[in-house]
Amino acid sequence: MLLRLAPSCEVYCHPAAMQARYSVNSSAARAIGMQRASALALERLPPERLHWVSEPTLPCERIGLTGLIPRETDYEDTGGPFFLDPAGTRPDPIEDDLALWLRTDAGLVVCLGCGHAGVVNTLAHLRRLAGNLPIRAVIGGFHLMHASEARVERTIAALGELAPEQIIPCHCTGERAASALAASLGSRVLPGEAGAVYCL
């Protein structure tokens, strides 16, 4: 749909974005890879408009992509039973979990997709890439819906230390974790809602 609406746009993806992947539990394996129509749309793109990204990349002066995000914390994980095979024998590290960042005059605005690398890992990586600029805002999925209480508490503590001015948790953060973030970090936490406008 997006490629139809913006036929001249350029697309940036990690090389693992199109591989088969599965959510596997005790009763079944469910394919959760890229939908075929989306994969076909990418395959049809002219090569000069499709960029495979595994290292930090600057599509333009003030917009960047993280590349592969180092997994450094001992409490953040991919957030679910994700595998590269339907038998559930090859864990999926979800290496294609990239984040987008924008450099503003007030600091970095960080946009997460589903945050499978961990929001704390992602922000720490970006602080190093951007020379310790302050974090103006972080918005997106923090993938805490099924996280343990201990992980949520440690994430909140780390976000307190990283001190983003605004924290806007969306979709896969989950209501429980979003409420805990707001209770601990107060007015810095804004609800992430479809159709909302944030002036950053």
Image: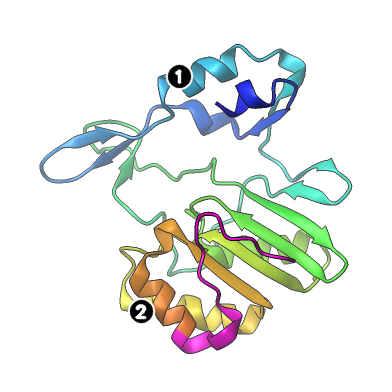
Q: How many marks?
A: 2
User: Label 1 is placed on what type of residue?
Assistant: Ala
Which residues lie in the magenta part?
A: 183-200
Q: Position of residue 170 (x, y in %)?
A: 48, 61
Q: Quadrant of residue 120?
A: bottom right
Q: Is residue 193 magenta?
A: yes
User: Label 2 is placed on what type of residue?
Assistant: Ala
Q: Main secondary structure of the magenta part?
A: loop
Which corner quadrant holds the N terminus?
Answer: top right
**Residue highlighted by disc 2:** 150
C-alpha gap between disc 2 and disc 1: 39 Å
Q: Quadrant of residue 150?
A: bottom left
Write the residue at 77% across / 56% down: 102
Q: Secondary structure at mark 2?
A: helix
Q: Position of residue 94 (x, y in %)?
A: 47, 44
Dot 2 or dot 1: first in sequence order is 1
Asked if 79 appears above or below 46 in the picture, the reply is below
